[in-house]
Image: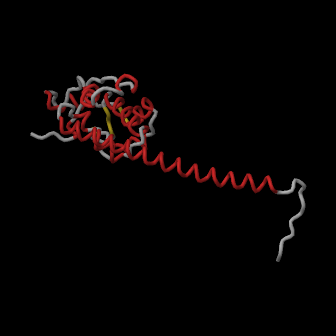
Amino acid sequence: MARTRRDRVITRTAPVPQRNRMDNAPLSEWCHTIRAGWPTVGDGLNRECARRLSRMRIGELSTRTGVSARSLRYYEEQGLLTSSRSDAGQRHYSDAEVQRVALIRQLFDAGMSSRVIASVLPCVDIPTDLGVVESAFATMTRERDRIDADIAHLIATRDALDVLISANSRYRAEQPTAQEPVARSA
């Protein structure tokens, strides 16, 4: 039976790796470190147990993560975050979603879009699938190259502005110091 994202239930949380500790680690280790020890429904948990573990409402998740409820709904809409629903339709999250939101924020802070994040997150969910790990690595490398290109463009733009500022400074230095009214032609 194939599992979908909604089937995933996390009962224990692993700390989100600190950047300075994991920067030089292989991507497969990074993916595994994030996921380590998180059992899923497929690991023997029944749905009733999963439902009972998912009792945090969106407001509490928002408070615990510092992310607005609106952003959390957006993450869920984009497939970055999952929740279960009560009979009344209220969203309920597991404690592990706090760590997932922290990871999502870290990826957003790294300049990734929600579409790119959605393509990287499977390496956290399935760290043993080398194809998924390699795909995530390739995606992150492409994002780094895109950011490098953006930085180069911004540097060129700044240099062009510096030329204009320099020309304006020379022009201002050549102007008489006394404020003489400038006659305007009509």
Locate the N terminus and report the quarter of the image it occupies.
top left
Residue 73 seen by the camera: no
Classify residue 128 as left or right of residue 120: left
Q: Which of 81 and 50 is in front in this view?
A: 81
Residue at 23% from the left image edge and 23% from the top image edge: 37
Q: In which quarter of the image is residue 91?
A: top left
Locate the C terminus and report the quarter of the image it occupies.
bottom right
Residue at 26% from the left image edge and 26% from the top image edge: 29
Residue 35: where, in percent of width, then height?
26, 28
Q: Nearer the viewer, residue 9 or 114?
A: 114
Q: Quadrant of residue 63?
A: top left
Above or below, 159 against 32 in this view is below
Residue 173: where, in percent of width, then height?
79, 52
Residue 181: where, in percent of width, then height?
89, 63
Residue 155 seen by the camera: yes
Q: Nearer the viewer, residue 59 or 156?
A: 156
Above or below, 131 against 156 in this view is above
Above or below, 2 against 171 in this view is above
Pick out the residue farthest to the bottom.
186
Q: In which quarter of the image is residue 47?
A: top left
User: What count of labels does the image hold?
Assistant: 0
Classify residue 162 as left or right of residue 111: right
Classify residue 31 as left or right of residue 45: right
Residue 77: where, in percent of width, then height?
33, 47
